[in-house]
Amino acid sequence: MLDRIGQMMVRKANQSEQRPVFDKAGEIPRHIAVIMDGNGRWAQKRNLPRIVGHRSGMQTVKEIVKAADSIGVQTLTMYAFSTENWKRPREEVDYLMKLPQEFLSTELEELIERNVRVRMLGDPQGLPPHTVEAMNIAEERTRQNTGLQLNFALNYGGRTEIVKAVQDLARKVQAGMLKPEEIDEAMLTQHLYTRDFPDPDLLIRTSGEIRLSNFMLWQLAYTELWFTDVLWPDFTKELFFEAIAEYQSRARRYGAV
């Protein structure tokens, strides 16, 4: 039964010999979220250290950011490091914490030229100072940009995000600033990390895993999901466009007929 559901819901990108072309005049997803999965397995398949896969995956980030910017995507959110990723080997975690600094040191000037605005989503508490500093510098230097909004979800967990939002609302109720019955979906949404952006229209996950992994649990309620077996370092702009073509072929009814 699960296999049948999977066949109906999941587009296996690497099984398509002739990739569909998205309609440039059609609806482009305003917000695309990406779970960049498979860096470690990509490296292991080549008998290389896992960190080599993460470095290669960084090149893919560059390509997909440019692709999204070129077609007018408004917001691109990349799941870079989850609250669960701290369980990984120390050497790998240390390297992942250096990647934002490494990426931005080489790419920030081009992002500024492209009018891209950078922001971190997640809890800065617990992140190394050099990671936080790199993100703060990027946010400050791109603050006035008006093009693609590029979000990096770092030390991010969907459940933690919702808990923090509920705690903020509870404090306001306790302080007499808010009545419990005044709390609705819109108000909770305004207390999330993503309060300044629309919910994702499209979620892309690479590497063949078919789950959300605690990513944007509230925001993905009506998001179109697209999965591929391709590992993140091998993901290309052509596959990115294929996901958009699939998105354009779906009817989004939000519970209506």
Image (cartoon, rainbow, N blue to C red):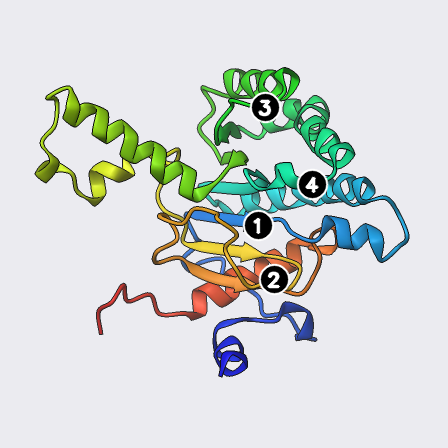
Left or right, residue 169 beside residue 224: left
Circles 4 and 2: CB distance less than 8 Å? Answer: no
Q: Do the residues under discs 4 and 1 have CB atoms within 8 angstroms? A: no
Residue behind mark 4: 88
Task: Check whether the beta carbons of the residues at disc 1 and disc 2 lie within 8 A of each other.
Answer: yes
Q: Please, what secondary structure does the residue beneath circle 4 have?
A: loop
Residue type at the position of mark 4: Arg
Tag 3 residue: 127
How far from the left and from the top, in percent, is residue 100? 66, 28
Q: Which mark is residue 35?
A: 1
Looking at the image, how many numbered discs can be counted on the residues? 4
Judged left or right of residue 142, residue 41 is: right
Crowdedness near tag 3: few (<14), some (14–19) or many (≥20) residues, C-alpha within 10 Å: few
Residue 216 pos. (x, y %) = 43, 46
In the picture of the structure, the residue carrying the numbered disc 2 is: 209
Query: How far apart are the alpha carbons under marks 1 and 2?
Result: 10 Å
